[in-house]
Image (tube, rainbow, N blue to C red):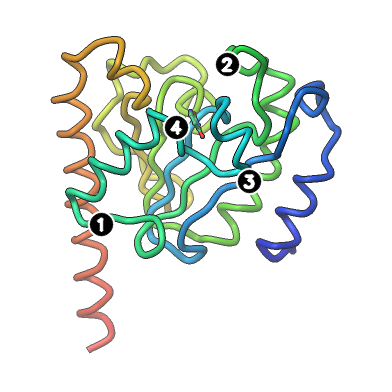
Amino acid sequence: MFTMDELSREIAGCTKCRLHLNRTNTVPGEGNPSARVMFIGEAPGADEDKQGRPFVGKAGQLLDKALNALDFNREKNFYICNICKCRPENNRTPADDEAEACLPFLRNQVALVKPKIIVCLGATSLKYIIDKQARITSVRGTWFERKGYYITATFHPAALFRDESKKRLFWEDLKKVKEKYDEIISFEQKKNL
Ligand code: URA
């Protein structure tokens, strides 16, 4: 079993798929390494590739703003990462073999963080975490319980720039995540009394 630092070093040296050829930096993930909530996106974009940090561009800033309004922040309450740790050129959707090559890193991250809640951001994350056939419009905001994790999905924050009407639904979904989080925290506190 890796530590998070060892895993990040492993990711930095990865050449398992073609995405390593064009990367500036790998983008392993960041946040509280023992958070109850883990957000999982698709793959780094240009800003993330430049900085080696997830969700730091326009979409990430929008996500942070929404989450901060719910009193969630990266240092304290959540861990955030992607299905793929390297940027696909022109921000194309990662190919199946690229995602499959990267998934063992994500499995290790989940095993290390041990979140109670996993939130898939967008269709790619939904596809590899919940169900290959699922549609974001039909499963968003609903909960799946698997292997002791509460798993849900919502729109990728970048989709909100393309379709403003998704903003309200996105916000509703995030509020459900916060409600579930509060339930878990209060259950844990009662258990420890
Ligand atoms: N989009 C993603 O899916 N992940 C990032 O880190 C940035 C943009």
What x and y, as percent, mark residue 1? 74, 64
The answer to whether the beta carbon of the residue marked 4 is less than 8 Å from any atom of ligand 1 is yes
- Frontmost of labels 1 and 3 is 3
What x and y, as percent, mark residue 58? 38, 28
Regarding mark 1 in the picture, which secondary structure is present there? helix
Residue linked to disc 4: 57
Counting other residues with Cα less than 10 Å from the Cα at mark 3, is it few (<14), some (14-19), or many (20 or more)?
many
Hey, what amino acid is under mark 1?
Tyr
| Side of 49 relative to 153 (left or right) | right
Q: Please report whichever mark, 4 or 1, sits nearer to the chain's N-terminal start.
A: 4
Regarding mark 2 in the picture, which secondary structure is present there? helix
* Image disc number at residue 91: 2
Q: Please report whichever mark, 3 or 4, sits nearer to the chain's N-terminal start.
A: 3
Residue linked to disc 3: 28
* Image disc number at residue 181: 1
What x and y, as percent, mark residue 107? 63, 47
Hey, what amino acid is under mark 2?
Asn
Q: Please report whichever mark, 4 or 2, sits nearer to the chain's N-terminal start.
A: 4
Q: Please report whichever mark, 1 or 3, sits nearer to the chain's N-terminal start.
A: 3
Work out how far the residue at label 1 is from the one at label 3, CA to CA, in angstroms: 24 Å
Point 71% across, 38% down: residue: 25
